[in-house]
Amino acid sequence: MTDALNLPKDLMLGAAIITITGKHEAYVENYMSLIEYTEELIRIQTKTCKLEIHGAGLYISYYTNDEMKITGEILEVKYC
C-alpha cells in the first residue's frame, strides 16, 4: 500500500529513523519513550523494538515528542 500511494515507509510502519554522524552524534526519530539514560547507555523504546546506544559520555542534547539528539562517543547501536 505504501508503494501504491508513494508514502514514506517509515511513516506508515512507524519505524524509527536513526541518523549517525561520525562517532559523536546521533539523531533518533519516531521513538516512543526513554527507558534508561546513563553516560554509558541510552535505551529507547520505539514502536517496533528497543534501541540501545552504548558509548562513553553520552548525553541527550535535546528531545521532543518525536526526536532526540544524542552526543558523546558512540561505540555501539543495538536493536533488541
Image (spheres, grey):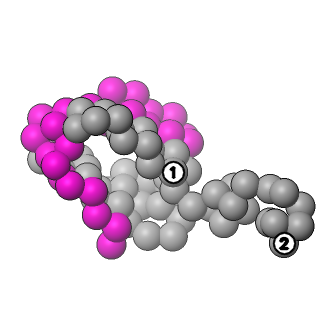
Q: Is residue 15 visible?
A: yes
Q: Which residue is farthest right?
A: 5
Above or below, comparing residue 12 to residue 55 in the picture: below
The image quadrant where one finds the N terminus is bottom right
Residue 27 found in image quarter: top left
**Residue located 43% across and 70% down the image:** 49
Expressed as whole percent of the image width and height from the top left, the position of residue 14 reads: 62, 61
Q: Which mark is residue 1?
A: 2
- First along the sequence among labels 2 and 1: 2
| Amino acid type at image mark 1 | Ile
Q: Quarter of the image containing the C terminus?
A: bottom left
Query: Relative to 41, is 45 above or below?
Result: below
Badge 2: few (under 14), some or many (20 or more) residues near its Cα, within 10 Å? few
Residue 17 has which mark? 1
Q: Within the magenta stretch, is there residue 76?
A: yes
Q: Over which residues does the magenta segment extend?
A: 54-80
| In the foreground, 21 or 13 | 21
Do we see residue 58 in this rendering?
Answer: no
Question: To which quarter of the image does residue 8 belong?
Answer: bottom right
Q: Residue furthest top?
A: 61
The x, y position of residue 65, in whole percent, is 54, 40
Secondary element under disc 2, as helix, strand or loop, is: loop
Q: Secondary structure at mark 1?
A: strand
- Residue 73 falls left or right of residue 16: left
On the rendered structure, is 61 left or right of 28? left
Q: Amino acid under label 2?
A: Met
